[in-house]
Amino acid sequence: MTGACSSTSRHWPRSWTGKSSIRGSGFGYRKRFITLEAHRQALLQPNLKDLLSYETGATSAEEIVATTYGAANALNKLKRARKLVDEETYRIVAENLRRGQEMVTLLN
């Protein structure tokens, strides 16, 4: 084996080893952007769901975005509860997440 991304590695997605097609990973998701230009254009989009570089058959882009915000909120609350962030930092992050969720709603 010649490194972590060797074609014989069983722990890395096949698309990372170069053994599967560029569009599919074999792990239940499909890449939405292939070229650097397509990725660059996605970065210009105002909505997080349009920025996602993958999609799945089981989960919509909207569900992925909602889950991401939910996880970020839960992590922020956990950090406050474990005193890993001060109250001011917690409030700033919570407000930024709330604003982000509000923008997602407005843009959909």
Image (cartoon, rainbow, N blue to C red):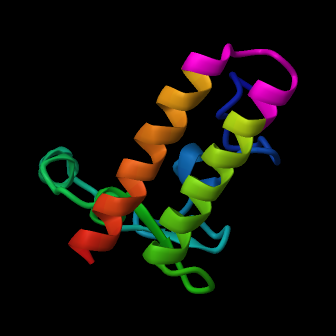
Res 91 quadrant in image = top right
| 36 w.r.t. 46: above or below | above
| 96 w.r.t. 2: above or below | below
- Magenta includes 17? no
Left or right of residue 72: residue 106: left
| 108 w.r.t. 65: above or below | below
Percent x, y of residue 67: 61, 63
| 103 w.r.t. 89: above or below | below
Left or right of residue 7: residue 82: right
- Magenta includes 87? yes
Percent x, y of residue 27: 67, 67
Res 17 quadrant in image = top right
60 and 76: which one is in front?
A: 76
Which residue is depicted at the point 61% across and 27% down? 90
Percent x, y of residue 74: 72, 47
Left or right of residue 24: residue 34: left
Which residue is depicted at the point 56% across and 18% down? 88
Which residue is depicted at the point 54% across and 39% down? 94
Residue range of the region highlighted in magenta in the rendering: 78-88
Left or right of residue 103: residue 92: right
57 and 79: which one is in front?
A: 79
Q: Quadrant of the C terminus?
A: bottom left
